[in-house]
């Protein structure tokens, strides 16, 4: 992992640029560059996403919420397994934007691709987690439909409470699924800006931060939806 992190294109690029500026400009940039390079190598070696990319199946999976078999299937194919309806349409639309973002990165120049090296696995993880949320949402909707049709029994109060909670989770899932498509559109615009200004590391950092936030929300929501499926 240390060797892979040390030879990572973005890390080597920063090291080379820093050394060149230290030679032609001022010597104090050299220790600063070395310290920055060492920090980047250390952080990359501990990054689970980078570990999975380098080590493959031996590393911690990006999205533990889904089984290994489903991760071998494209998110578009998994989306086609969803029941026909509005949720499936929204997911398929979001995945279409996701593919455009991937294509924008792959079609960019070498420098931009090196800067966005971390973004691609994050995008793949977000697409898989989006489908996870949609699957959980559809299962929760199925349970909610069954609860709403239950006859009056001594346990009716508990069922109504469960139904209200399920409906709230479904509402949150619907909001997140709709918002993901919009967020992916924003990410595509950020990729274009990075390709124009690839020497600005702040833009790539902002893109990765947005992807991390999106992944965190989708993962947390998919876990909540899974818990709801196991509820009585």
Image (spheres, rainbow, N blue to C red):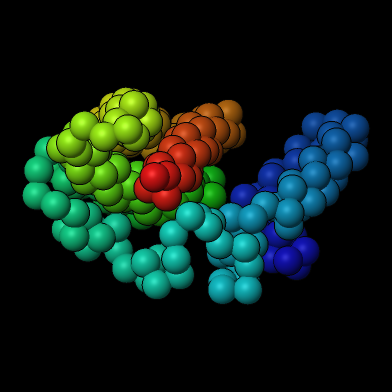
Tell me the residue at 62%/50% (across/down). Answer: 10
- Residue at image location 34% in from the left, 34% down from the top: 155
Q: Quadrant of residue 168?
A: top left
- Where in the figure is residue 56, as x and y percent of width and height? 56, 72
How far across and how far down the image is residue 24, in percent?
Answer: 79, 37
Residue found at x 64% / y 55%: 48
Task: Decide which of 141, 202 is in the foreground and name it.
Answer: 141
Residue 91 or residue 83, whichever sits in front: 83
Residue 184 seen from this side: yes
Q: Number of numbered discs present? A: 0
Looking at the image, is 187 positioned above or below residue 102? above
Identified at 53% across, 57% down, the residue is 64
Residue 99: percent from the left, percent from the top? 27, 50
| Outermost residue to the left | 84
Q: Is 50 placed left or right of 203 in the picture?
A: right
Residue 27 horizontal/vertical position (percent): 90, 35
> Toward which corner of the image does residue 179 lie, by quadrant?
top left
Could you tell me which quadrant the C terminus lies in? top left
Can residue 141 be seen?
no
Q: Is residue 26 left or right of residue 51?
A: right
Q: Quadrant of residue 49?
A: bottom right
Q: Is residue 140 left or right of residue 80?
A: right
């Amino acid at each position: 992992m240390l060797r892979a992190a040390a030879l990572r294109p973005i890390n080597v690029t920063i090291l080379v640029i820093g050394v060149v500026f230290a030679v032609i400009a001022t010597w104090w940039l050299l220790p600063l560059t070395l310290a920055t390079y060492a920090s980047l190598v250390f952080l990359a070696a501990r990054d689970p996403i980078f570990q999975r990319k380098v080590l493959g199946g031996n590393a911690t999976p990006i999205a533990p919420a889904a089984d290994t078999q489903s991760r071998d299937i494209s998110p578009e194919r998994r989306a086609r397994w969803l029941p026909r309806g509005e949720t499936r349409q929204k997911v398929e639309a979001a995945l279409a934007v996701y593919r455009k973002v991937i294509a924008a990165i792959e079609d960019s120049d070498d420098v931009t691709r090196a800067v966005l090296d971390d973004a691609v696995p994050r995008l793949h993880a977000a697409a898989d987690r989006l489908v996870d949320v949609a699957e959980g949402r559809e299962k929760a909707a199925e349970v909610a439909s069954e609860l709403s049709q239950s006859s009056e029994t001594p346990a009716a109060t508990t069922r109504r409470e469960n139904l209200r909670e399920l409906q709230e989770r479904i509402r949150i899932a619907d909001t997140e699924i709709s918002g993901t498509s919009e967020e992916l559109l924003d990410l595509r615009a950020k990729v274009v800006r990075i390709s124009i200004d690839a020497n600005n590391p702040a833009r790539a950092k902002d893109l990765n931060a947005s992807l991390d936030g999106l992944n965190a929300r989708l993962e947390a929501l998919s876990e909540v939806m899974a818990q709801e499926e196991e509820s009585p």
